[in-house]
């Protein structure tokens, strides 16, 4: 994000603004649901709603910080700080929550998947932590799972877990991004392979599964898209303006999204979902553990949603026209 010229970002945001979203604006107008008050959280890069502690949302910092996650209450104040004692915080970019069906305990998945050099690391890691029973500062131990991509290194910021199958997914942050599925059973004694199963919007910064597993959302810097399954779009959702949109999660009832930003005293907004993207009234049958269908970049990805859900060909035409307009304006001003 920091490498993209401000003029380009402004143009892209303006271009995206002409595409209507299908959801209402953030609840209570433009007022955030809460602000993250902890001065230690200056680069909130992920959100996960606790499946067992009502009102608790977990967040963590981006790269350059220690291996801590923060349990934040509905007033934005930190209830507890958990240090992951056996983890390395190389470039933490996302966090997801699920429930262990055997024990009923909450599970947190912390994704050390950032790779701004697109190949600087031989593999990336996701840490699995059993959610603490009490909101008290503590040091926790995690299980580390290592991953590599079947089609080469990727920079990624989105992680999500299907609550029905328990399968882990990573969403890459690229101009032609993808949704990558982990094996049905991930192992600690080898590097697991992530395989592309669908496209993702341009520069995806986070992702999350709905609590009932009926859909998932992918966040970009400018908008969010809800999918029934990889490549199967349900709705585009208009997001509130944020300094640097980095995180998204479903509320516990699945009827709205929480989205946040980096920065000190960063806001977290609650955005209601359109009816078409809300959980169904009757639960769908659980998925099998069969591996999702793998796709190539020349297949479904060619038809991937672009920025704010604009099809890629349309987006590039818009970018080209905008660039031509800027060049013409500069030439006109220079010639005066």
Image (cartoon, rainbow, N blue to C red):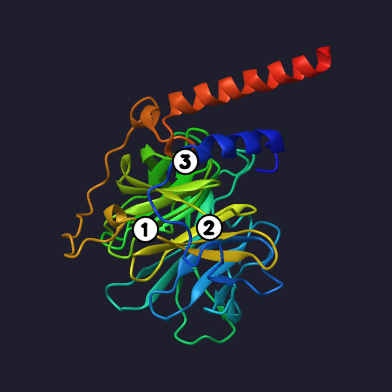
Above/below status of 328 relative to 206: above
- The residue at the point 70 percent across, 34 percent down is 7
Pick the front one: 87 or 69:
69
Q: Splitting the image into 4 quarters, where does residue 230 fall?
A: top left
Q: Which residue is mark 1?
A: 273
63 displayed left or right of 228: right
Element class at badge 2: strand
Q: Which mark is residue 247?
A: 2
Q: Residues within 10 Å of mark 1 (few under 14, many from 20)?
A: many
Residue at 76%, 15% (x, y): give it.
Answer: 332
Q: Nearer the viewer, mark 1 or mark 2?
A: 1
> Which class describes the residues within 10 Å of circle 3: few (<14), some (14-19), or many (20+)?
many
Above or below, 131 relative to 322: below
What is the spatial separation of the Cα atoms under label 1 and label 3, in whole angstroms?
Answer: 16 Å
Are the two marked residues, 3 and 2, in contact with CB atoms closer than 8 angstroms? no
Which numbered disc, 3 or 2, marks the residue that appears first in the sequence? 2
Q: Please, what secondary structure does the residue beneath circle 3 have?
A: helix
Element at label 1: loop
Q: State the residue at coordinates (52%, 74%).
A: 141
Residue 293 image offset from top left, x and y in percent: 27, 39
Query: In front: mark 3 or mark 2?
Result: 3
Q: Camera-side residue: 102 or 286? A: 286
User: Closest to the observer: 277 or 336?
Assistant: 336
> x and y percent of residue 82 in the render?
58, 77
Mark carried by residue 308: 3
N-terminal of the pair, mark 1 or mark 3, is 1
Residue 177 x %, y %: 47, 37
Mark pair 1, 2: CA separation? 16 Å
Labels 1 & 2 near each other (Cβ < 8 A): no
- Tell me if residue 225 comes above or below residue 249 in the rendering: above
């Amino acid at each position: 994000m920091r490498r993209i010229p401000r003029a380009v970002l402004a143009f892209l945001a303006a271009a995206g603004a002409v595409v209507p979203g299908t959801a209402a604006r953030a609840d209570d107008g433009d007022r955030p649901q809460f602000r993250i008050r902890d001065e230690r959280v200056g680069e909130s890069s992920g959100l996960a709603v606790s499946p067992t502690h009502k009102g608790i949302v977990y967040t963590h910092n981006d790269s350059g910080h220690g291996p801590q996650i923060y349990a934040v209450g509905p007033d934005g104040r930190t209830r507890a700080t958990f240090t992951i004692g056996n983890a390395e915080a190389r470039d933490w970019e996302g966090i997801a929550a699920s429930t262990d069906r055997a024990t009923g305990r909450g599970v947190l998945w912390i994704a050390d998947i950032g790779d701004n050099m697109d190949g600087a690391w031989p593999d990336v890691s996701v840490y699995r932590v059993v959610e603490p029973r009490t909101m008290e500062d503590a040091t926790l131990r995690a299980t580390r799972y290592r991953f590599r991509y079947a089609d080469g290194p990727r920079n990624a910021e989105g992680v999500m877990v299907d609550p029905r199958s328990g399968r882990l997914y990573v969403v890459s942050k690229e101009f032609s991004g993808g949704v990558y599925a982990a094996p049905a059973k991930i192992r600690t004694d080898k590097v697991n392979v992530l395989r592309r199963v669908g496209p993702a919007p341009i520069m995806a910064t986070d992702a999350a599964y709905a609590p009932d597993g009926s859909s998932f959302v992918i966040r970009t810097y400018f908008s969010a898209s809800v999918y029934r399954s990889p490549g199967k779009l349900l709705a585009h959702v208009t997001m509130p303006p944020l300094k640097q949109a980095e995180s998204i999660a479903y509320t516990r009832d699945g009827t709205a999204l929480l989205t946040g930003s980096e920065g000190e005293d960063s806001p977290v907004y609650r955005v209601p979902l359109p009816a078409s993207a809300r959980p169904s009234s009757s639960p769908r049958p659980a998925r099998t553990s069969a591996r999702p269908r793998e796709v190539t970049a020349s297949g479904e990805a060619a038809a991937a949603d672009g920025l704010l859900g604009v099809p890629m060909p349309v987006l590039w035409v818009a970018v080209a026209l905008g660039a031509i307009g800027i060049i013409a304006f500069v030439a006109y001003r220079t010639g005066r």
